[in-house]
Each structure stands twice: as structure tokens, then as C-alpha cells.
Image: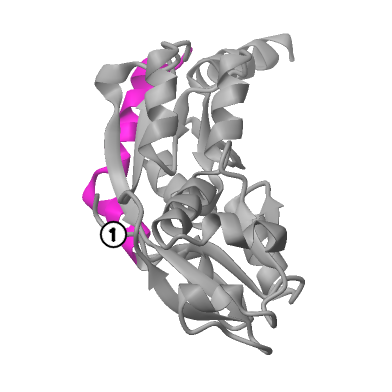
């Protein structure tokens, strides 16, 4: 009995030793695509499990700065990753752009719908959902676009700030606001509950960088995941969710 127990333990210990968890903090807009990418990556690394933390990019970077145990950071914009590099929170030589997106104006399935950005100033548009520019990249893209159209200041009384892009999506799809700004990929997953009105310009290109976190305890594996994101299999999944090439 004891011999059998020892034998089973001797077989289990290598498996336990090889089991690894890779923690990835990723922008909220990557939620659906990354959940599809996870099993594909895990299949190439037996014993590896991906664990995700999805939130606004600025919030994620703050968590990393405060010591959260993270191995890979994937941001929805370049400035947030730039701040990570400036604070020496990422291994800069591992930084790779892996996806692109676009900013769109959306409205609930029913009700008034602005045909142009200028129409947001009309009285029937009372509430507009926007990501918080200080921490949410889609909010910064939105602010830049509205400033370019000279609408940011005039629209301030109407703006409802959201903690991440998915919260903007929820506000619009539930009809709690009259319009909102999200990425096209987010709008596509809820297009049965809202209308995509127009693609918005006047901002920096929406590109997604990923990098290994400087304090990662799984640095080699984290590098493999960043590389995997730029490979054909992950790129095909990202494309199915509407992401473009960077």
C-alpha cells in the first residue's frame, strides 16, 4: 500500500512541478478574443494555465505598479504602455504591437440617433457615455476626436463617464444613455442591441501593444505568450473578433 502511494506521488510530483500559471492583465476590449486564444496557447504548453485580469488599461498598469503579480500586460493604447516603460514596469525589449481597432459612435437600438458628431449637441441627445480619459484608452481616443471636432467642452454637461469600454457598451445597449463611444470590436458583439452610427476619426491610431512585466516570475513563458499573439493562430482569432493588424 505504502509502495503504491509512494509510486503515485513520484508520478504526480513532476506534473505538479511542471504546472505553471501565467497571469495576463489585458484591456477590457480584448476579453472575448483572449478567452478564445487561451486554450490554443495552453495546447502548445502542456501544464500551463492562463489566468486573465480584464479591466481598463490604466487601472491594470496601476495594479502592476502596486505590485500585483502579473506576467504579461496587454494595453489598448501606446501611451499607457509608454508609462509602463518609463516606470520600468515592463521589459521593453519584449514589447510588441499585435492588434488594431477603430473608434465608433453607437446608439441604443431605439430612439434618436445622431448622424454626425455635431448632432451630439442637439437637445434630444441628453446623455453620452465616454470612458474616463485618465484611465481608459477609449476615453482618451474619444476626447481627442471630440476636441478635434471642437465638441469636447460643449458636450461636458451630457457626458457620463465609464470605468471601461464594456461599461460604455452596457450603458448604450441598456438604453441608459443616448449615445456612446466604443471600439468597433465591442460594438460588433452587441450589435443586436445597438446601432453602429459611424466610424470616428480625429485621434491617434488605435493599436494594442503587449509586453512582459519586469517582475514576472515566468519571464520565458511570458515571452512565449507575447510572441504567440503575433503568430498566425492568434491573429486569425483576433481577426474573427474584428481586430486588424497593427
Image check: 56 left or right of 97?
Answer: right
Q: Of helix, strand and loop, which one carries label 1?
A: loop
Image check: 184 left or right of 157?
Answer: left
Q: Quadrant of residue 229?
A: top left
Instruction: Tell me the residue at 61%/32% (across/down).
Output: 59
Q: Is residue 122 visible?
A: yes
Q: Indicate whether 231 appears above or below 85.
A: below
* Residue 225 on the magenta span: yes
Front position in the image: 128 or 39: 128
Instruction: Tell me the residue at 59%/18% (across/down).
Output: 69
Q: Which residue is mark 1?
A: 244
Q: Position of residue 119 (x, y in %)?
A: 53, 79
Image check: 22 left or right of 9?
Answer: left
Report the predominant secondary structure element of the magenta stretch: helix
Q: Position of residue 53 (x, y in %)?
A: 60, 37
Q: Is residue 225 visible?
A: no
Asked which colour scheme the image uses, the reply is one colour
Question: Which stretch is magenta?
Answer: 217-239
Amino acid at each position: 500500500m505504502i509502495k503504491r502511494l509512494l509510486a503515485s506521488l513520484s508520478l504526480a510530483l513532476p506534473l505538479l512541478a511542471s504546472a505553471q500559471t501565467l497571469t495576463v492583465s489585458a484591456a477590457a476590449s480584448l476579453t472575448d478574443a483572449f478567452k478564445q486564444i487561451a486554450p490554443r496557447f495552453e495546447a502548445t504548453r502542456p501544464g500551463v494555465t492562463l489566468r486573465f485580469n480584464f479591466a481598463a488599461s490604466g487601472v491594470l498598469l496601476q495594479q502592476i505598479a502596486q505590485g500585483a503579480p502579473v506576467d504579461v500586460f496587454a494595453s489598448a493604447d501606446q501611451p499607457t504602455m509608454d508609462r509602463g516603460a518609463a516606470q520600468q514596469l515592463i521589459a521593453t525589449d519584449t514589447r510588441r504591437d499585435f492588434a488594431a481597432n477603430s473608434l465608433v459612435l453607437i446608439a441604443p437600438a431605439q430612439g434618436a440617433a445622431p448622424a454626425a458628431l455635431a448632432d451630439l449637441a442637439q437637445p434630444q441627445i441628453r446623455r453620452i457615455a465616454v470612458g474616463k480619459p485618465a484611465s481608459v484608452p477609449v476615453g482618451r481616443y474619444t476626447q481627442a476626436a471630440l476636441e478635434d471636432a471642437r465638441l469636447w467642452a460643449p458636450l461636458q454637461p451630457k457626458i457620463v463617464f465609464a470605468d471601461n469600454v464594456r461599461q460604455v457598451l452596457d450603458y448604450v445597449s441598456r438604453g441608459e444613455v443616448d449615445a456612446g463611444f466604443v471600439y468597433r470590436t465591442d460594438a460588433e458583439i452587441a450589435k443586436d442591441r445597438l446601432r453602429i452610427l459611424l466610424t470616428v476619426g480625429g485621434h491617434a491610431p488605435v493599436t494594442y501593444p503587449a509586453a512582459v512585466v519586469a517582475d514576472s516570475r515566468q519571464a520565458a513563458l511570458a515571452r512565449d505568450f507575447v510572441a504567440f499573439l503575433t503568430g498566425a493562430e492568434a491573429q486569425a482569432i483576433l481577426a474573427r473578433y474584428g481586430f486588424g493588424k497593427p
